[in-house]
Amino acid sequence: MEKILNSYDSQQFLLNYADLPKTQLVQTSQEITLPLPLVLKLVSNQAIHKTEINGVRFAHTKEELEKEFTSLLELSKKLEIQGILAQEFIEGEQLIIGIKKDSVFGHVILFGLGGIYTELLKDTAIRKCPITAQDAKEMIDSLQSKQLFHNFRNKKLNTKLLIKNLVNISRLPLKYKDIQELDINPFILNQKEGKAVDIRIVFN
């Protein structure tokens, strides 16, 4: 039977495989100790696609934090929730990293431009799992948008960190053969850091 992990459980699952943002799972806004700005996410097994129910909010001030937190609690009245995930806000390029279980090739890893551009540009590369650092470099350089990773407009993204994450994530199916699908969208990368911000994992 198919099992889908929510955003919090997916994050816990990836602790040893990917760089993750600082987060807290809370029931009240008073429990939050992370500094602003923050991303607030509703955590429920009944709402895996949070954006479809407006379950992701941004808070830059204390006033916004209280307002958005209260709004999410109102939204959650019709759902069974684990809580609200408070997550550090990270700026950078939005990328996608995914794993799919293919009926012919077995597990493959996908990488490319993420966020709202995923469907629009379809600028991705695919390799069979697991991959090496060299494979990861080749995936990056096969993208139409490869210039983005090589000092584009004097912005040097931390590709070394990205490669480490790609290699580590590609090794997941060696241990967890029942992974059907894994989506990290976005993985946010900037000059200093790269973090798996939103994660969804499906097991069969």
Image (cartoon, rainbow, N blue to C red):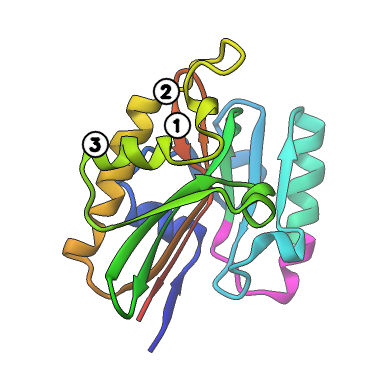
Element type where label 3 sits in the image: helix
Quarter of the image where one finds residue 13 = bottom left
Which quarter of the rendered picture does the C terminus lie within? bottom left
In percent of width and height, residue 72 lies at 74, 56
Magenta range is 74-83
Which quarter of the rendered picture does the N terminus lie within? bottom left
**Label 2–label 1 contact, CB within 8 A:** yes
Q: In this view, does 202 lie to the left or right of 152?
A: left
**Label 1–label 3 contact, CB within 8 A:** no
Specify whether residue 96 is in view. Answer: no
Q: Residue at x 77, y 27 (%)?
A: 61
Which one is closest to the eye, mark 2 or mark 1?
Answer: 2
Q: Which numbered circle lies on residue 54?
A: none
Amino acid bearing label 2: Asn
Amino acid bearing label 1: Gly
Residue occupied by mark 1 = 194
Residue occupied by mark 3 = 134
